[in-house]
Image (cartoon, rainbow, N blue to C red):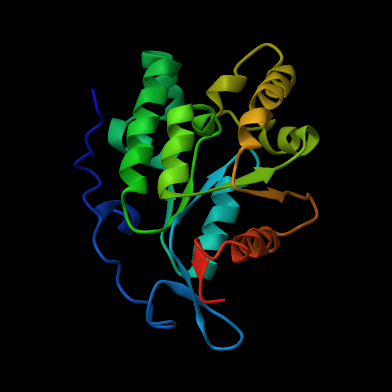
């Protein structure tokens, strides 16, 4: 059964509606003003992939702001549609149910206008999701080492997969099993504990500038 949008959230995100987004007063379109005065226009949705704690939401938000495009978090869209938290979905319906709904939400969002899309840590593991992202957008892997990830997630109670007797070992096992999938992403950007969110977003922009099929006008 597919999720239906909750009536509590009637306003749709510009990345999801399929409608032409409003123009930016600064650039005249969805894009980033470059030093030379030209506009860098995003042509495809940028899907941020990687482990929990890699910074997909924070860096994705900064990247979307820099490009002047909408930012969407797929987990938030699932929560909105289900009217339940991710942890509640896992507990009540199980992970397979969640993954199926996750794929439905990703497909819907990828049909919309270009945006920056933060995906859940397990989303890129499914071949069907990787194919969807490859066909409609570009996957950016925020690569962070295990120690950095653990420092970021160890005190958070919102990670259902880490509700085990040894959460660090669980994180390590997840990390090792998922890296081969993340390594298939189109662009890889290394996270650093001493780099600001804006600095990470600039690293992503640097990677995207090498892809004229994704970022136009630079």
Q: Does residue 183 appear to the left or right of 74 in the view shown? A: right
Q: Does residue 52 appear to the left or right of 69 in the view shown? A: right
Q: Does residue 1 appear to the left or right of 134 in the view shown? A: left
Q: Residue at x 61, y 37 (%)?
A: 184
Q: Which of the two residues, 108 or 14, is positioned nearer the viewer here?
A: 108
214 shown above or below 30: above
Q: Does residue 5 appear to the left or right of 154 in the view shown? A: left
Q: Residue furthest top?
A: 165
- Report whether residue 44 is seen: yes
Q: Residue at x 52, y 57 (%)?
A: 61
Q: Position of residue 15 (x, y in %)?
A: 34, 55
- Report whether residue 51 is seen: no
Q: Residue at x 48, y 28 (%)?
A: 127
Q: Residue at x 51, y 84 (%)?
A: 38
Numbered marks: total: 0
75 shown above or below 118: above
Q: Residue furthest bottom?
A: 37
174 shown above or below 110: above
Q: Position of residue 175 (x, y in %)?
A: 69, 27
Q: Which of the two residues, 177 or 8, is positioned nearer the viewer here?
A: 177
């Amino acid at each position: 059964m597919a999720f239906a949008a909750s009536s509590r959230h009637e306003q749709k995100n510009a990345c999801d509606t399929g409608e032409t987004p409003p123009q930016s007063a600064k650039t005249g379109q969805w894009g980033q003003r470059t030093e030379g005065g030209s506009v860098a226009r995003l042509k495809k949705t940028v899907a941020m992939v990687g482990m929990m704690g890699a910074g997909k939401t924070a860096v994705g938000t900064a990247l979307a702001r820099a490009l002047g495009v909408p930012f969407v978090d797929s987990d938030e869209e699932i929560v909105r549609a289900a009217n339940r938290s991710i942890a509640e979905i896992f507990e009540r319906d199980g992970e397979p149910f969640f993954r199926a709904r996750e794929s439905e939400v990703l497909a819907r969002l990828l049909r919309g206008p270009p945006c920056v899309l933060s995906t859940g840590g397990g989303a890129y593991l499914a071949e069907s999701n990787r194919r969807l992202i490859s066909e409609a957008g570009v996957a950016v892997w925020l690569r962070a080492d295990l120690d950095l990830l653990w420092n970021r997630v160890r005190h958070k109670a919102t990670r259902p997969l880490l509700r085990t007797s040894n959460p660090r070992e669980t994180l390590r096992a997840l990390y090792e099993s998922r890296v081969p999938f993340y390594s298939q992403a189109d662009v890889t950007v290394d996270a650093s504990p001493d780099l600001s969110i804006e600095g990470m977003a600039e690293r992503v922009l640097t990677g995207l500038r090498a892809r004229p099929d994704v970022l136009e006008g630079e």
